[in-house]
Each structure stands twice: as structure tokens, then as C-alpha cells.
Amino acid sequence: MVLILGLSPIRTRLAIKADKLLQEAFVCRRCIHQRAPAPPTHRSNRATPFLTAFRSRGPAQSRSQSWSAAASPSPPPSPLAALGKSLGESSGTRSQPKTRVKASSWPETSSKSVAYWLLGSAASVFGIVVFGGLTRLTESGLSITEWRPVTGSFPPRDEEAWEQEFARYKLSPEFRMLNSRMNLEEFKQIYWMEWTHRLWGRVVGITFLVPTMYFIARKKVDPRMAWRLVGICGLIGFQGFIGWWMVKSGLKDDLFEQGKHPRVSQYRLAAHLGTAFIAYLTMLVNGMRILQEHRLLRDPTEGAKLLETLQRHELKPFRRFVGALSILVFITAMSGALVAGLDAGLIYNDFPWMGQGLLPPRREMFDPFYSHTEDQRDLYWRNALENPVLVQLDHRILATTTFTAIIALWGYSRFSPAVRATLPKAAKGGMMGVVHMVSLQVILGITTLWYLVPTPLAAAHQAGALALLTTVFMLGSRVWVPRRSWRLVQQALSRTTKKHISGQKAPIASAQALNP
């Protein structure tokens, strides 16, 4: 009896525990949802699909669900159904940020400030090309015999530094063969010319590199223009290397061989000038293209009409002719660089005659002296590039061909009824500018030859070559139709059409709301 009384508290506790287990295990669905939730151990703000599906519901949710369950016989969704629904909602909500990520933060069109900066940089390159011609004509290019990209920016500061610089120049072939009587004051004159030319080149590089970094970092340019600016920076650096490579060719000791002359290689001179021309043209063309895009997008309707006019088949031969003409002008300018490198303008100083006729004697045009092989397989191409007589003749032929081609293109645009009626007014003005510039360039070339290459006329003739190339490319920008410009205009037209349609639907919807 005592044992039974001792076990009675244990039996009571077991009965209470069994009752709780029965209530938790065997309970109807409605009672489960009506039961108050247990307090969570921690709160989480993450809205993952699994937490959304299996999260405990609050009292307000329980009451609303019990009310809906009482009103409707449909059972509440199971956890798996809730999980599927939450996954669908999460995928729908996550698809919106993806569209925002795909939208590029780069602008469609580069800023106008980039265009003005490119044109200003092109003007600076134009100036250094002209000044480089003056440096060559005054025979100042070989006065600095070292290439120091950083420390070379500072000139000699005292008399001792000037004497050291002059001593280095005395070791060069040019001083020993041509300028052995030069004193320190005369050396300073040619030194300042070359130093200014090199310093100008450094300024061009810095004033292009730093703004390029700024415009790209601030996203003032479109992605394609950003890559182009980086390419131009590399081209400027490559141009500096070619400049020293050219000067180095005039400092070699083999210039003391018989028949040699202390001058830079005409091939390297042409490469140096050609790279400068390419850098100038890339700056010019990209600057004009940005301004053209802004003009077309200012009024997309008028811009589309202009582009459609330029794409007509009547202007297709004209556009091709302008493209071929730009290549011809560039080749003619490079042949002029060969003439300058060989001092070929100092012979046959008459025009159109060369001696007793229009052509010099054959033995002078194809001299075996310039051949480097026993069988003379390289006779023709070496004379065409290294013989001053044939180099001058080549330049005359190319210049005459360029002048004739430009006059023929002007006549085609003037007397062809289809082209004359279709060609825009701006393109007609550009055509006349090319005709005037080539006429001036021919006059400068002939007078430079007649007067034995005086420095002012020779520098003006070199500047005229770049100016003629500029006018040809400006004419091309008025008749060529870039695909990018056409695509931007079409996009602007589609956006304008959508805004116009939505603007028309709004008054109709408001009127329908007022009159149901």
C-alpha cells in the first residue's frame, strides 16, 4: 500500500505527459492553424523561398485564414504548394534587377566636349607637323643626340651644361661632315628648334592621355569611342618612338662611306610623317563624327531624310570616288616625304620639264648605282624609292594625277544631272573647298621647286598637303553614311513615335473615363 502511494505522483506526471503528446500528435488541421505560434528564437529578414513557404504565420494571418476557411471549404495550401508559389514570385521579382543590370550605363553618343577636345588636339598635331617640317628644313633634327623622354624635357641651364651638349653634337657625323665650323651660339639655334619640337610632342601626349582617362572614368564617351581614344594614345606613344628611330638613322658612323650624306633615312622620315598624319586624321574624323551625330539627333526626322538622301544610288559612285581620292592624296603626301628625305627638290628645278623633256634620261631614272644585287633584280624598286631623280618624277606624276582626279570629281558633281540634284548643299561647298585647296597646293609645289626649296615655301607646301587631306576628309564626312549614325537616328525616331502614340492614348482614356 505504501508502495502504491509512492508511485502515484509518477503516474500523475506520466498521464499529463501522455495527454500533451496526444494533443500535439492527433489534432485536426483547423486546430493546427488556429494554434498560437511559438516565439521564434531569432528573427530573419531574408525572404528566401524556403522561409516564405515554411515560415510560421502570425495571429492576424491565422485569423484571416480561419475566417476564409470557415467561409470557403477549400483547404489552405500545403507547404510544397507554398514553396512553388514563393519560387515563382522570387523568380519574377529577381528578373527585374537583371534587366536593369543589362542596361548599359555608358551613353549612346559621346559628349560634345569630347568632340571639341579632339578637334583641338588635331589642331595641335597639325601645328607640330608644320613645326617638324621647319626643324627638318633648318637641319636642326640631329642637334640632340640622345633620347631622354623625362629628363630631356629640361634644357641646359648654365654654360657648362651647354658645353657638354655641344660636345655630344661634335661626335655626330653631321657636325664632322657639314658643320665643323659651327660655334656654340649657332648650335643653340638648332638645339632650341629640336628641343621645342620634342617638347611639343610631349605636350600633345600628356594633353591627350589625361583627358582620355577623365572622359572614360566619367563615362562621357560611348564604349566604341573609349577604345578609339585608347588606340590614339598608343599611336601617339608609338609616334614618339618612331621619331627617335628616325633621328638615330642620321647618327650612324657608316655615313662616312663614299656617297653617303648625314641625313635621316627617307623611309623612317616617311613613317614618322605618315604616323603623324594618321593620328591627326583619327582625331579629326572622330571629332567631326560626334558633332555629326548630335546634329542628326537634334531633329531625328530631318536627320533621317538627310541620311536617306545620301544613301541613294545616284551618290554611290561619288562616295566611292571620294574614298579613293583620300587614299591617293595620302600616297602623294608620303611620296613628298621621300622627296624631302632625299633632298630631291634640289635637282631639276623646272616644271613641267625635267631637263630637255618631260622625262629625264633613262640612265638617270634607273641608275645601277642604287642596286644592291649582282643580277640587279632590285634595280627598279630601289631607284623608285632611293634615286632622287625618279623619286621626284614619281611625286610629280602622283601630284598631277591627284589634281586631275579632283577636277574630274568636281566636273562629275557639277555636270551630272542626277548627282547635281541629289548632292546636299554642304557637300557641294566641301567639293569647292577641295578644288581651291588643291589649286593652292599645286602653286606652292611648283614655286618651291622653281626657287630651290626656300624654307617658308617648303613648310607651306608640307602644311598644304595636310590641309588638302583635311578638306578631302571633310568632304567625305558630308557624303559618307556611318552605320552607327543611321542606327542612332532610327532608335531616336522609334522613341519619338512611341511617345507620340502614348500622348494620343492618354486623352482618349481620360475621355472614356468621363463618359462611361
Image (cartoon, rainbow, N blue to C red):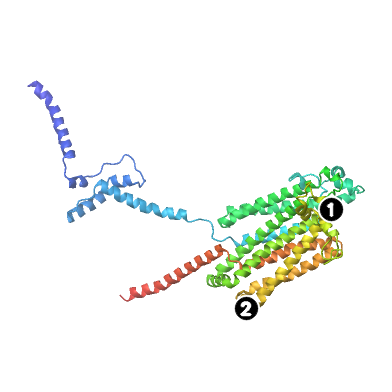
Q: Residues within 10 Å of mark 1 (few under 14, many from 20)?
A: some
Tell whether 90 sits left or right of 146. Answer: left
Q: CA distance from mark 1 to mark 2?
A: 52 Å
Spot the residue most to the front.
Answer: 375
Identify whether 23 is placed above or below 122: above
Within the image, what quadrant is residue 503 found in?
Answer: bottom left
Identify whether 8 is placed above or below 97: above
Of mark 1 and mark 2, the one earlier in the sequence is 1
User: At which x and y percent is residue 268?
Assistant: 75, 51
Question: Which quarter of the image is occupied by the C terminus?
Answer: bottom left
- Does dot 2 land on a helix, a strand or a loop? helix
Q: Foreground mark, 1 or 2?
A: 2
For badge 1, the amino acid type reads: Glu
Residue carrying label 2: 417
- Does dot 1 land on a helix, a strand or a loop? loop
Spot the residue most to the right.
Answer: 181
Within the image, what quadrant is residue 463 found in?
Answer: bottom right
User: At which x and y percent is residue 224?
Assistant: 57, 56
Which residue is at 45% across, 71% downward?
500
Residue in the foreground of this view, choosing between 500 and 59: 500
For badge 2, the amino acid type reads: Pro
User: At which x and y percent is residue 141?
Assistant: 81, 51
Which disc is residue 139 wearing? 1
